Amino acid sequence: MIKREDLHRNLLKALEKKVPDKKELIEMLMEMLFMEKGAVYRRLRGEVPFTFFEVARMAEKLNIPVNHFIYSDDEQIYRFEITEYTNMNDKLFNDYMSLIKRAKNDPHSEFAETANVLPVSILTGFETLTKFYMFKHQYLFRGTESRIPFSKYNYSEQTKRVFKSYFHETKYFANTIHVWDYLIIRYLVTDVKFFHTINLISVNEMLQIKTDLYALLDYIEQTTLSGCFKETGKPVSFHISDTNFDADYCCVHIDDVYVSHVKSFILNSVQSFDKTAYQKITNWISSLKKASTLITKSGAVFRTEFFEKQRMIVAEL
C-alpha cells in the first residue's frame, strides 16, 4: 500500500507539472475547490490531507488521470488517452498544443517521429495535402456522409489556423528526428488513385495534390541538405527506413514532461504522459534508426536516388 507521504509527494508533482507557476496554482485551486488561500496552503504543505472528492475534482478540472496523483513517474501505470487532431475543441489536443509552444524555451527539447503516413508536423504545411487527409478521415469514419466529393469537402478556418500553428511550433525543438518508411509516398499516391477511381477526386484535383506533393518533396530535400528547418534554423535529421513499420510513433520531451504517441485513425493518436511509455517508444525509434539510412547532410547518392524515385511515383498522378 502506498504511504501517505508518498501519495502527497506524487500529488504535488502532478499538480506542479500541470501548473508550474505556484501563484497560478494556488489561485486555481482556491477557485476550483472553493477554499481560502490558507486552506489551500495547508493542503499543499501536507498539514491537512486532500479529500477523495478534492482529488477527483482536481483530476477532472485539470484533465489529469487520477493515477498520476497516486504514482510517481517511475511507478506510472502505462495509460493511454486519445488525442483528436480533427477536433479543435478537444481538451487533450489543446493541452498538447500548449505544451508544444514551450519547446522554443527549452534548450534540451526533443521531437522524434516515425511515419509511414505523412506526419501532421510536416503535412500541415501543405494545405491541399492536409485537406486530402481530412477528406480521407471523414470518408472512413462518417458512414453515408463520406460520399462527399473532394471538391465539396471543407473544414473550418479555425482548424486550418491551428494546423498551421502546429506546423510552425514543431520547428522550434532543440532537436528533431524523423524516421520515414521508404514507401511513405507510394502509400499516399495509391490512396489518391483509389479516390479518383471511385469518382470522388477529379483529374484537376489530383493535379493539385500532385503539385503539393512536389512542393513537399522539395521542402524535405532542402531541409536534408541544410540539416535544419528554414523557418527556425533548428536542427533536424531525416532517416529513411529499410523496413516497413507496423505503426507510427512520436515522442516529445519538453522540460520535465515526457509525451509519447501511437498514431491512430489517420489524424488522431493514442497519447501517454507516462515516462515508462516514453522510454519504450524512444528505444523503439532508436532501433528503427539502426535499420535506416541517414539522408541529412550525408548519404548524398542515396538521398538523390530516393528523391528521384519519389518524384517518379508522384508523376503517376
Image (spheres, helix red, strand yellow):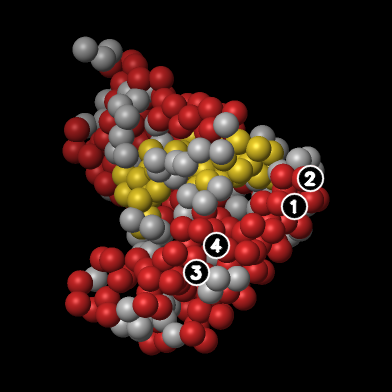
Query: Nearer the viewer's eye, disc 1 or disc 4?
Result: 1
Question: Residue 304, which numbered label?
Answer: 1
Which badge, 3 or 2, is on the more N-terminal residue? Answer: 3
Q: Residue 20, image x and y in percent?
A: 51, 39
Query: Nearer the viewer's eye, disc 3 or disc 2?
Result: 2
Q: Is residue 281 left or right of residue 105?
A: left
Q: Is residue 299 left or right of residue 79?
A: right
- Give the residue displayed 80% in from the left and 50% down from the top: 226
Q: Residues within 10 Å of mark 3 (few under 14, many from 20)?
A: many
State whether residue 285 appears in this view: yes
Label 2 and label 1: CA atoms lie apart by 6 Å
Circles 1 and 3 in contact, beta carbons < 8 Å: no
Q: Is residue 98 left or right of residue 277?
A: right
Query: Which residue is the site of mark 3?
Result: 130
Query: Which residue is the site of mark 4?
Result: 123
Label 1 and label 3: CA atoms lie apart by 26 Å
- Give the residue displayed 69% in from the left and 58% down from the top: 308
Kindly state the secondary structure of the residue where label 4 is placed. helix
